[in-house]
Image (cartoon, rainbow, N blue to C red):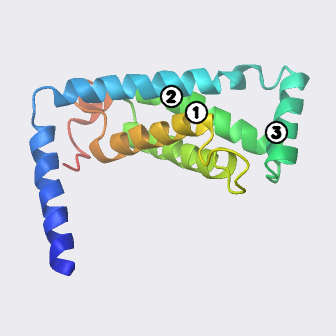
């Protein structure tokens, strides 16, 4: 069993190194970053009205507090939506990609586990919004492991200083 796991890991490491050096890889990373950033910006743009709209704060109080049972629901909503919005902008630009993607991945994982899975069998196990949060988590994980790529501000500013692969 240990040998099989080692072979599997070695194969994936080799495949990842080959994929990273493919000419289209950086274009794929750019498209993935822009898609993730756009999805996060549109999902988190309610943060712009957060302090001016009592109706929006009441909505989050009800959703995060009463429906999901989270403590400090307005604070949790502010942190989640703020992370989506600012992280989306940073990922779109390719600036501090790994850090902002880590925060986005964390928020999307919590959103999937808390709000988008039906543990009681009342409907489908993964709710419709769950597919968005799962795919956002996966794209953010890709950005964590690969960074912003060749077409990012990270590459311009840091010149591969923090390159993992």
Measured as percent of width and height from the top left, residue 76 is found at 74, 44
Locate the N terminus and report the quarter of the image it occupies. bottom left
In the depicted structure, whether residue 67 falls above or below residue 1:
above
In the depicted structure, whether residue 118 falls above or below residue 43:
below
Mark 3 packing: few (<14 Cα in 10 Å), some, or many (20+)? some
In the depicted structure, whether residue 56 falls above or below residue 133:
above
Task: Write down the residue under mark 2.
Answer: 88
Task: Write down the residue under mark 3.
Answer: 63
Whether residue 93 appears in this view of the structure is no
Q: Residue at x 81, y 25 (%)?
A: 51
Whether label 1 touches label 2, CB < 8 Å: yes
Cα–Cα span, label 2 and label 3: 23 Å
Residue 91, by quadrant, is top left
Q: Is residue 51 left or right of residue 20?
A: right
**The one of 136 and 33 positioned closer to us in this rendering:** 136
The disc placed on residue 84 is 1
In the depicted structure, whether residue 112 falls above or below residue 96:
below
Cα–Cα span, label 1 and label 2: 6 Å
Q: Which marked residue is nearer to the observer: mark 2 or mark 3?
A: 3
């Amino acid at each position: 069993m240990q040998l099989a796991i080692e072979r599997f890991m070695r194969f994936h490491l080799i495949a990842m190194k080959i994929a990273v050096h493919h000419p289209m890889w950086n274009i794929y990373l750019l498209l993935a970053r822009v898609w993730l950033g756009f999805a996060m910006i549109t999902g988190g743009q309610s943060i712009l009205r957060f302090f001016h709209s009592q109706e929006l704060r009441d909505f989050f109080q009800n959703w995060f507090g009463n429906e999901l049972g989270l403590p400090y629901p307005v604070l949790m909503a502010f942190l989640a939506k703020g992370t989506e919005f600012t992280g989306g902008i940073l990922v779109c630009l390719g600036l501090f990609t790994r850090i902002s993607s880590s925060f986005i991945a964390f928020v999307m994982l919590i959103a999937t586990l808390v709000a988008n899975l039906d543990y009681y069998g009342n409907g489908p196990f993964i709710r419709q919004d769950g597919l968005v949060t799962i795919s956002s988590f996966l794209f953010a994980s890709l950005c964590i492991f690969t960074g912003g790529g060749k077409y990012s501000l990270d590459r311009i500013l840091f010149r591969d200083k923090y390159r993992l692969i």
